[in-house]
Image (cartoon, helix red, strand yellow):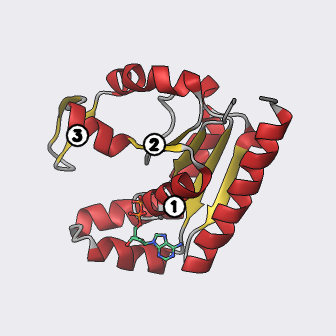
Amino acid sequence: MLLPNILLTGTPGVGKTTLGKELASRSGLKYVNVGDLAREGQLYDGYDEEYDCPILDEDRVVDELENQMSEGGVIVDYHGCDFFPERWFHIVFVLKTDNTVLYKRLETRGYNEKKLKDNIQCEIFQVLYEEALTSYKEEIVHQLPSDKPEDMEDNINQILKWIEQWVKDHGS
Ligand code: DAT
């Protein structure tokens, strides 16, 4: 059976991992966290001193994922989206969280002042939404609210319906 590939993107802390894992368990699609994949395979290209984190080797990430993406049925989670091949994704969801709510979530994570400020600005200026709009066809890019548990439930139900329809439309 043909299954769609879904991209979940947005500022760190908006709820991509929480939504992605729950969606995978309820849809049967496979969940891939690009941050974890990079860590496991050490898919890095240098170190960013300013942000105190390794720099993702985007080409190696793409190579690593190519086979399973061409098979379909993958949910990809990452706080960036401009380096994936456009053809990979059938739909793109950009999660969005109220600044005050996001600030509290990131504070709980123990982010330092600079990292907190940068991520909140990233959310205020809708950086990931803009990146998604310039990287994919506008009609496949959707913003989803991710402030409270009910939002996640609504998002999951909406995406499950979309998957069901996609499968019907694309035959078996
Ligand atoms: P991300 O993967 O985007 O970095 P996450 O899934 O790790 O984000 O979520 C960050 C925190 O926010 C985590 O403690 C779970 C919580 N969270 C996620 N989605 C939520 C929602 N819709 N309502 C309330 N809390 C949520």
Q: Given the image, on which type of amino acid does mark 1 rest?
A: Glu
Q: Earlier in the sequence, mark 2 or mark 1?
A: 1
Nearest to the eye among marks 3 and 2: give it: 3
Q: x, y (%) of residue 34?
A: 37, 40
Give the residue at x 49% y 26%.
68
Q: In the image, is residue 86 above or below residue 18?
A: above
Q: Which mark is residue 31?
A: none
User: Mark 2 — residue?
Assistant: 80
Q: Quadrant of the C terminus?
A: top right
Is label 1 in a helix, a strand or a loop?
Answer: helix
Residue closer to the observer: 112 or 145 = 145
User: Mark 3 — residue?
Assistant: 39
Q: Earlier in the sequence, mark 3 or mark 1?
A: 1
Image-quarter location of ligand 1: bottom left
Is label 2 in a helix, a strand or a loop?
Answer: loop
Label 3 – label 1 distance at C-alpha: 22 Å
Is label 3 in a helix, a strand or a loop?
Answer: helix
Residue closer to the observer: 165 or 80 = 165
Report if the beta carbon of the residue with label 3 is closer than 8 angstroms to ligand 1: no
Label 2 – label 1 distance at C-alpha: 21 Å
User: Mark 1 — residue?
Assistant: 22
Nearest to the eye among marks 2 and 1: give it: 1
* Cβ atoms under marks 2 and 1 closer than 8 Å: no
Q: Given the image, on which type of amino acid does mark 2 rest?
A: Gly
Q: x, y (%) of residue 28?
A: 57, 47
Q: Given the image, on which type of amino acid does mark 3 rest?
A: Arg
Q: x, y (%) of residue 167?
A: 77, 38
Give the residue at x 81% y 45%.
165
Nearest to the eye among marks 3 and 1: give it: 1
